[in-house]
Each structure stands twice: as C-alpha cells, then as structure tokens.
Image (cartoon, rainbow, N blue to C red):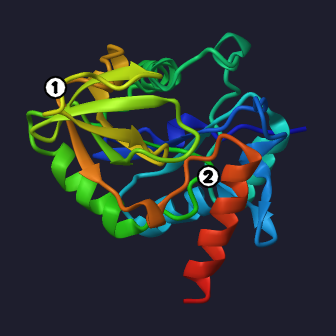
C-alpha cells in the first residue's frame, strides 16, 4: 500500500518549492518521464538538481501514477496526492497543473512566494541557471522567468520576443515583422510567483522575463530523435 506524504509536516511558511509534473501518459515516447538515461529514470535528474540547488523547502511531484510516485520518492521527492485524471490528459497545460498545486497549498495553509515548475525530462539543467532565474523572479515586475533558445528541434511554435520580454506564442508560422526575435520554449523549467500560478496567469506575456540558453545546454524532448539527441549531449557533458 502506497502511503502519501503528509502536508502537515511541511506546512510552515517558506519562500519557494519545486513542482515536477510527471503524468503517466506520453504522446510519442512510452513512459518518457521514467525512461532510463545512463541507467536511472530520467526524472531523477530533475529531482536531484532541485534538492542539490538548496533553493526549495521541498521538492514535490504531481503525478497520476503510483509507479512514478514510488520512483520519485526513492530519489527524494515528496508525493502529497495523486493528480486527478481530468488534469492528466494530453490537452491539459502546465498552468492548469500548477494552479491545481497552488490551490492544494493554499487549502493546506502553506504560504510561499514562488513555485518552480521543473520538467521531468531535463537532465541538462544546471543549478547556476536555476539560481539565476530565481534571482530574476524576485524582481517584483515579473510573473514568470522562462529559459528560451534560438529556433530549433521538433517544437512547432515560436516565441515572439521584443526587448527581451515575451510578447506572444505563435503556432507554425513566422511573424512578418523582422524586428521581432524568434525563439523556442526550451521545456526545462518555469519560475513563477505563487499568485501567477494560482490565478492561471499566462506564461507567455509582457510580464515574463526570458533567459537565452545555448542549444547545447538542452533538448526539449518530444520525439525519439529528440531523445537520441539528449543522450548524445548528456554523455558529451558527462565525459567532457
């Protein structure tokens, strides 16, 4: 019998927590969130990064799967609930999942300022980048801080950026204005203020700060080709 962690033991006020969304389903790569990379589940890298960064009161996983929950707890994450099925389908976005988590914290009387959503397939993130984004989110103007990169990979959306502020997300086609810079969301992490998640504020807006990441530092894994590229970069970094 799987026993959930009790939120009452972690309900003192704190500055920030990490939430890793890891549902069971995956469109193109079976069991992507727990697929083995260098012999261990890929989600374990995100958990260990969050813990080792020392930025968070605790690291929590939102999943609809007991198997994933057991794996995540083994690597140090807390599991306070199983994510409802209505929030575990392909068409449910990050904001909805994080808003559900923010509501859970509020109902549990947990008072925090920031939630960092760290994706489960992001083994190339380094703590310096995570800390840089944390420093930026603490500036009052921003709702979110998001790492982005030059257009590449299997992502079919563009992020239209002006003056390093995210303006809007464009699907499939480039805008005509040549003065706007185009990037992709890297699919690594989002730092957000508690109220931004709670009230479901759009991630992509003029109140978002972006950090430009080199392509060699990430892979947004959507296809098997992306997974192969991730493995290539991971081992290159490991044996550098």
Q: In this view, does 190 lie to the left or right of 1?
A: left
Tell which of 170 and 202 is nearer to you: 170
- The residue that disc 1 covers is 206
Q: Which mark is residue 77?
A: 2
* Crowding near the residue tagged with mark 2, few <14, some 14–19, many ≥20 C-alpha atoms within 10 Å: many
Residue plotted at (66% across, 29% down): 81
Secondary structure at numbered mark 1: loop
Residue at x-position 49% and y-position 43%? 187
Q: Which of marks 2 and 1 is nearer the N terminus?
A: 2
Residue 14 seen in the current view? no
Residue at far right of view: 1
Q: Quadrant of the N terminus?
A: top right
Specify the label residue 184 is tagged with. none
- How far is disc 2 from disc 1 in space, using C-alphas? 33 Å
Residue at 52% x, 50% y is 59
For discs 2 and 1, the disc positioned in front in the rendered view: 1
Image quarter for residue 138? top left
């Amino acid at each position: 019998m799987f026993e959930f962690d009790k939120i009452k033991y972690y309900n003192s006020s704190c500055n920030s927590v990490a939430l890793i969304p890891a549902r069971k389903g995956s469109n193109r790569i079976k069991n992507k969130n727990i697929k083995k990379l260098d012999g261990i589940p890929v989600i374990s890298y995100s958990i260990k990064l969050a813990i080792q960064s020392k930025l968070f009161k605790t690291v929590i996983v939102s999943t609809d799967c007991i198997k994933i929950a057991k794996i995540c707890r083994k690597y140090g994450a807390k599991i306070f609930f199983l994510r409802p099925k209505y929030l575990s389908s392909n068409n449910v976005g990050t904001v909805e999942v994080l808003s559900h988590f923010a509501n859970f914290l509020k109902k549990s009387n947990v008072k925090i300022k920031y939630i960092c959503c760290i994706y489960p397939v992001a083994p190339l993130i380094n703590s310096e980048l995570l800390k840089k984004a944390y420093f930026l989110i603490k500036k009052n103007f921003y709702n979110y801080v998001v790492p982005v990169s030059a257009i590449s990979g299997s992502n079919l959306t563009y992020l239209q950026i002006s003056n390093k502020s995210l303006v809007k997300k464009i699907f499939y086609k480039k805008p005509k204005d040549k003065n706007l810079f185009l990037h992709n969301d890297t699919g690594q992490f989002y730092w957000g203020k508690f109220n931004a998640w709670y009230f479901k504020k759009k991630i992509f807006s003029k109140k978002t700060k972006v950090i430009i990441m080199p392509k060699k530092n990430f892979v947004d894994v959507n296809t098997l080709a992306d997974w192969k590229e991730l493995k290539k970069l991971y081992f290159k970094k490991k044996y550098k």
